[in-house]
């Protein structure tokens, strides 16, 4: 089952192009890796280009959502977790 690139949205085309660029980076890393270092080189390339690819897709997905462009204050506060109370600590027994 292949993709009909003529029917893809602009966001989907961007994701597909980005995925191809990541794959090319991985293939180049395999070709140029020193003997015994192939997996390390591919993992490095994946961290460098793969996360960039995911950020591109995330940005495109968020920007395509109608409400993503709205500005304003948050709906409610996001309180941080409270640190544990020292009074709740168990007493040491000797």
Image (cartoon, rainbow, N blue to C red):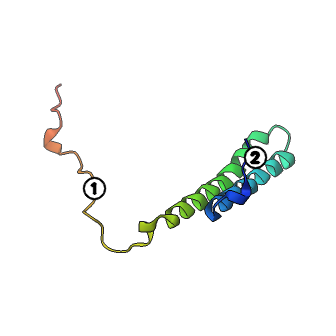
Most extreme residue toward the top, as rendered? 94
Instruction: Identify the residue at image location x=72%, y=59%.
Output: 6
- In what element is the residue under mark 2? helix
Where's residue 5, x and y in %? 73, 56
Q: CA distance from mark 2 to mark 1?
A: 39 Å
Q: Is residue 17 visible?
A: no
Label 2 crowd bin: few (<14), some (14–19), many (20+), radius 10 Å = some
- In what element is the residue under mark 1? loop
N-term-proximal mark, 2 vs 1: 2
Between residues 56 and 86, which one lies in front from this camera angle? 56
Between residues 77 and 13, which one lies in front from this camera angle? 13
Q: Is residue 25 left or right of residue 46?
A: right
Instruction: Identify the residue at image location x=59%, y=58%.
Output: 57
Where's residue 47, x and y in %? 65, 51
93 versus 63 height, above or below: above
Quarter-wise, where is residue 85 in the image? top left
Q: Which residue is mark 2?
A: 41
Q: Is residue 26 visible?
A: yes
Where's residue 51, x and y in %? 61, 54
33 versus 15 height, above or below: above
Which numbered dot is residue 60?
none
Q: Which residue is mark 1?
A: 80
84 versus 49 height, above or below: above
Most extreme residue toward the left, as rendered? 87
Q: Is residue 25 left or right of residue 50?
A: right
Label 1 crowd bin: few (<14), some (14–19), many (20+), radius 10 Å = few
């Amino acid at each position: 089952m292949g993709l009909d690139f003529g029917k893809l949205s602009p966001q989907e085309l961007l994701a597909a192009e980005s995925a191809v660029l990541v794959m090319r980076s991985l293939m180049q890393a395999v070709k140029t890796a020193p003997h015994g270092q192939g997996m390390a080189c591919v993992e490095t390339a994946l961290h460098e280009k793969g996360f960039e690819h995911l950020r591109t897709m995330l940005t495109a997905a968020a920007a395509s959502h109608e409400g993503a462009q709205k500005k304003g204050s948050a709906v409610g506060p996001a309180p941080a977790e409270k640190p544990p109370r020292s009074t709740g600590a168990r007493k040491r027994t000797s």
